[in-house]
Image (spheres, rainbow, N blue to C red):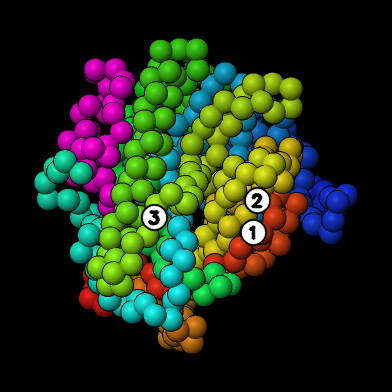
Amino acid sequence: MVGFQMLLFLTIELKIDKGDEMKQIFKENKVPIMSWATELEEKTLEQAINLTNLPFIHNHISLMPDAHLGYGMPIGGVITCKDVIIPHAVGSDIGCGVCFINTKLNINIIPLKEVLSEIRKLVPVGVKKHNKETNFLLDNMPCPDVRLNSIIHKLFTNAILQLGTLGSGNHFIELQKNSKDELCIMIHSGSRYMGYKICDYHNKIAINLNEKYYSSVLTKYELAFLPTNSKEGNDYIEDMNYCIEYAKANRKIMLSNCLEALNKVTLEEISMHNYIDVAHNYARLEHHFNKDVWVHRKGATSAKKDEIGLIPGSQGTSSFIVRGKGEKLSFNSCSHGAGRLMSRKRAKKELNFDEEVKRLNNKRIIHTIRTKDDLDESDGSYKNIYEVMDNQSDLVDIVEELKPLACIKGKIKRKY
């Protein structure tokens, strides 16, 4: 592996013609790496270089401004593959994404703590799930119109109970305000245990296939692949697409329950017709640089020309509604959030608890930083969202900035 300092030496920085934006282009690889990230850890760049060595990579690798270390492939990475699909390049939270709604209610008349308490009664968080199947859950569960022996059928009973649940990690329910002081709700979550198991199941199949046919892709890359013209590849695509629909249904149910909680407190009925939902962990067939290829977005948002996207910040910082510009070099993509600045372990070790809490308290945000163990989800553990947005001004236009008011995270157990 080439040393990191040498890699930086080989970096060529090119200005984009249509503005003052800057991206890094790493050209000394089998295919170029185009990075909109101004900060890349050595291991993140190493993962990107591993991607360039894949024989089926098309044209180049793109790293969004929120790029950071992932499993097998950087989170915030976008690759295009010819005739293959890679489970770990989609990730274990298949279909993970963000949904949003503007309630149109003035924030000054809403008791936020009461609303949060009611939401917690309706939305299980962390490892919790619903106690029993209900007609409501069954009616909203995507129909598993897939192979009878699919792993989905084995996971189906548990998946019903997890539908409409938040999970943990960086998943959140956030109450926000726009420039008109209207209450908005944003939810970040995915396909829960089902997505994890399906990724693991198909990755093991890919590993066995690659070993059987003496694939040149090194095992240490953790990027085993499936040919899309094979039964195994088609099985994964079918299961992946189901997970994407399941994750979307999961977010929609949570949002519906948040509005029910809001109605209980305010007696206001809010329509669901104007909500937005955007996934950022998936693969799909698209046309780029004169070829139909499988675009893998792992922690990246589609940003086709005039396409609406959602980019959440870290806890305590603004989120954004954006409109895509259709930048070809990013494969019509942009960031999926602020992106981690440091690992969870490092955040808990290095960040100052009092400083992080003071920063949130000064903004009068109802936050979830209660102990040092929560520092992995504090502002300081993430990149500066404004720098991230500046670094992708050639990828998206900002439609609206949303400022945080209150947040629910999966692992916090408390009453408001």
For this orientation, the residue located farthest to the right is: 17
Q: Is residue 262 visible?
A: no
| Frontmost residue, 129 versus 374 | 129
What's the magenta region?
137-165
Locate residue 107, reporting x and y percent: 44, 76
Mark 1 crowd level (few <14, some 14–19, many ≥20, 10 Å Cα): few
Q: Is residue 318 above or below residue 165?
A: below
Cα separation, mark 1 vs mark 3, equals 22 Å
- Tell me where residue 343 appears, x and y as whole percent: 47, 61
Q: Earlier in the sequence, mark 1 or mark 2?
A: 2
Classed neighbour count for the residue bearing mark 2: other residues with Cα under 10 Å, few (<14), some (14–19), many (≥20): many
> Front-most of 211 and 246?
246
Q: Can residue 117 be seen in the rendering of this structure?
A: yes
Q: Are marks 3 and 2 in contact (CB under 8 Å)?
A: no
| Residue at the limit of the structure toward the left, as seen here | 132
Q: Mark 1–mark 2 contact, CB under 8 Å?
A: yes
